[in-house]
Amino acid sequence: MTTALAAKIARDYGTPAAVIDMDRVERNIARVQAACDAAGVANRPHIKTHKSPVLAKLQIAAGARGITCQKLGEAEVMADAGIDDILISYNLLGDEKMARLGALRARTNVTVAADNPVVVADLTKAAAAAGRSLPVVVECDTGRKRAGVETAAEAITLARTISTSPGLTFSGFMMYPTETGWPQAQAFFDEALAGVRALGLDPAIVSTGGTPNMKNIGQLQGATEHRPGTYIYNDRMQVAAGVASWDDCALNIYSTVVSRAGPDRGILDAGSKTLTADTGGLDGYGLILEHPEAKIVRFAEEHGFLDLSRSNTRPNIGDVVRIVPNHVCVVVNMLDEMIMVRGDEIIGILPVAARGKLR
Amino acid sequence: MTTALAAKIARDYGTPAAVIDMDRVERNIARVQAACDAAGVANRPHIKTHKSPVLAKLQIAAGARGITCQKLGEAEVMADAGIDDILISYNLLGDEKMARLGALRARTNVTVAADNPVVVADLTKAAAAAGRSLPVVVECDTGRKRAGVETAAEAITLARTISTSPGLTFSGFMMYPTETGWPQAQAFFDEALAGVRALGLDPAIVSTGGTPNMKNIGQLQGATEHRPGTYIYNDRMQVAAGVASWDDCALNIYSTVVSRAGPDRGILDAGSKTLTADTGGLDGYGLILEHPEAKIVRFAEEHGFLDLSRSNTRPNIGDVVRIVPNHVCVVVNMLDEMIMVRGDEIIGILPVAARGKLR
């Protein structure tokens, strides 16, 4: 079964194709903004999901305080588009990055994160290059074991280091609690807050992260803002996490069934170079809306292997199906552009302007 | 520990960065060409690995008969660069693709694959649009259960369908035997060959595939050409498959250690948006040349999680390390350009010209 829109997409653009439904995008933007507003927490969406200044501006127009970027290259694209309030939630390091960060800070209201004194020492060079102070938040690990100082004592020490470093301003704390780790994050934050206050410092920013954590929004007493990213498109992981429904999934990969060499199997023209090998911890590599019982069991680079053995309905060669990816952020990372639709109407092409900014 | 070259790359370009050693690239090209020559099998390298006309021309200059592409978009880029002998080893389907294939065929010596009559019927439209005959090989499944007809009888039937379809020429067979499946491939081919000969047809092309299959090169009696791809760069999978050494791995991701929040762990600035979640079936996500005992245990999008608990040497924050990816083809697929080096000299930038050609 091929929908009328899928037939049109295949005819005019070919497959595989990335298609975003702007009605859903706008609804997702509005819903998460409303949830942040209701919780009394500012929204600072992470643009790593969409990498588009056009969409970032929709988020800001809907009420977001600013944006979050994960890389300098993303932040530069956003600043070029006129977005002025940017948090780079990442340890930046090295002369090449400090020169770029200095130039960015000279023209933009940018804040950066740090979890160690080596990074803090480098950041002073960016501040010097900018000719103005650079705000820095301390990244705190509250259970994810990614970046972030592991204890409140370290957070306090690093806050002091930042506050006494030439050109740097201590601006607060950034954390990304696990979905069940908010009490742990609260204890960490309370201790860190007391410690920095004893030093005469005050955190202007207390930032939490993650679309799956929208179910915890407002739970951290003292949080000033939240950094959800994936919610603008959603994906199979967000549905599994209970923070989105299938109708909230705004990005589909349209793919053609190109082979049915066995009765119980088929091949899609979307493989790991379109959908990535990232399962997000789920079984199978995406949901096929037309055949939810079909399983994408594995990928070659340009082949998706379909197991149809449990499918009551089986696609024919030439059918164009719609796939909800497991993890939409890594899919967008490979794409130069999106086809924008509203309902059954194709309304334009959206460049993924910050794609390919490796650093 | 940061090598002098790594320090230079980090200073001039920043990390993460994709760096190819052209001495190794040329050595890999020469070695595989020599192996094909010795086996009496033409080399038709698959450009899906490098997506660069510059490198494809090096392969042809070294003796390759032509190239293999997996997508029309790749083939169009290669044809634009003047490469004239192209096999598209994929079922192409749909009006949009047939119009493009027709235009490509009108100007290029292109052959395509098919494993079913729906695709064959569509291909007649491309031939009509081209105004000249279109050569088609039958894709045969010899155990991989990807695309390809499952039996010799089906291959023979499809060969007849092709030969009687307006504008199409039956050109032979294409297969991708598993590494242990060459006897099975031989039996399949022998039966298919006898069948098409009985129809008065003769396969001009009998094509096998895969860099891991270089150890089987020459084993299929009747094979005319082989389609290795990954060998130009090699990766951790090829080393594991026994067809390359670490010194043959020509592409490294240079990455900075940005956090060491715990004594037994570290964070790289290369995550799944740089190295992909594709493990290639291996344990860990790449080899760190400076710290081979360190394990890249998992990724966030821009974070590589290092387990250093078994490392005698542990990197410091700011160290720039070199990573051999597990699967180089999917890494290249995300990159706009490569930094080319010879030994310790940076010699230029290579655009990944056919990247982003989604279809």
Image (spheres, coloured by chain):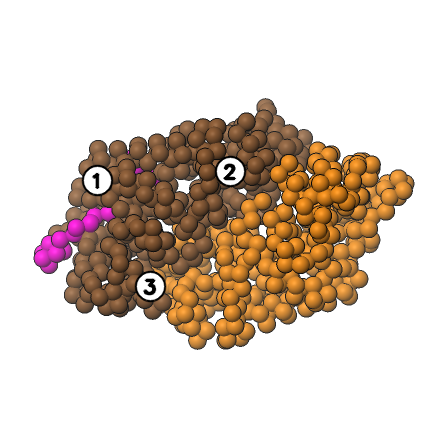
Chain colours: A orange, B brown
Instruction: Please name the residue that numbered disc 3 is placed on.
Output: B100
Q: Earlier in the sequence, mark 2 or mark 1?
A: 1
Circle 3: element type: helix
Residue B161 included in the magenta stretch of the image: no
Report the magenta residues as a range.
B196-217
- Say the numbered circle drawn on residue B194: none
Mark 3 residue type:
Arg
Horizontal and vertical percent position of residue B301: 58, 48
Graded by Cα atoms within 10 Å as few (under 14), some (14 to 19) or many (20 or more), the crowding at tag 3 reads some
Instruction: Please name the residue that numbered disc 2 is placed on.
Output: B253
- Determine the CA span between mark 3 and mark 1: 31 Å
- Say the numbered circle drawn on residue B41: 1
Q: Earlier in the sequence, mark 3 or mark 1?
A: 1
Q: Is residue B185 left or right of residue A83?
A: left
Please tell me in which quadrant of the rendered image residue A316 appears.
bottom left
Are dots 2 and 1 in contact, CB under 8 Å? Answer: no
Quadrant for the N terminus of chain B, please.
Answer: top right
Please tell me in which quadrant of the rendered image residue A10 appears.
bottom left
- Determine the CA span between mark 2 and mark 3: 35 Å
Q: Are marks 2 and 3 on the same chain?
A: yes
Number of the front mark, 2 or 1: 2
Give me the residue at 73% from left, 52% from top.
Answer: A109
Number of the front mark, 3 or 1: 3
